[in-house]
Image (cartoon, rainbow, N blue to C red):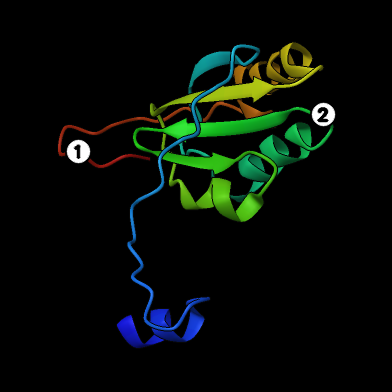
Amino acid sequence: LAVKESQLSPVTGAETTTTAPSAPAPDGNAEEVRLVVRNRLGLHARPAAMFVSTANRYQSEILVVKGEQFANATSINQVATLGVRQKDEIRVTAAGDDAQEALEAIQAIAEDNFGEADEVIVELADGREF
């Protein structure tokens, strides 16, 4: 990667450092909700698409945070990359004029299990499910 960094560096020979990004600190106007993802497959394609579609209806800057990772809530690729699974807790933050409305809409779809029916899972004594 050092060769590629030197090719992309704006100043020849300039040192570059790579640090893992951290979630931007919410400003004083940011709102936040914590959600536990209940659906069996987590935020897979359909729920993630619904999440992103809902976030895109608002002008606020919306982030979703899982542990140390964060994503722009309006990007399907970023949200899917978080790997949110069943029972994971996520934080959703929003900053902007319609932040409260955005979070209420996201919380509503999460409470509705992202439009997916709850599946009845039967666990057998040997750990298998059907």
Q: From the viewer's perspective, is residue 90 above or below residue 48? A: above
Q: Say which residue label 2 marks.
A: 58
Which residue, as the protein is rendered here, is positioned at the far left? 126
Residue 45 in the image: state x and y as whole percent.
61, 50
Residue 95 in the image: state x and y as whole percent.
68, 22
Q: From the viewer's perspective, is residue 127 above or below residue 6? A: above
Secondary element under disc 2, as helix, strand or loop, is: loop
Q: From the viewer's perspective, is residue 51 above or below residue 60? A: below
The CA span between labels 1 and 2 is 43 Å
The tag earlier along the polypeptide, 1 or 2, is: 2
- The residue closer to the viewer here, 15 or 105, is 15
- The residue closer to the viewer here, 11 or 9, is 11
> What's the amino acid at mark 1?
Gly
| Image position of 103 (left or right of 68) | right
| Image position of 37 (left or right of 105) | left
Tell me the crowding category of disc 2: few under 14, some 14 to 19, or many 20 or more residues within 10 angstroms, Cα based.
Answer: some
- The residue closer to the viewer here, 85 or 126, is 85
- Which residue does the image show at 41% across and 34% down from the upper left? 66
Q: Say which residue label 1 marks.
A: 127
> What's the amino acid at mark 2?
Tyr
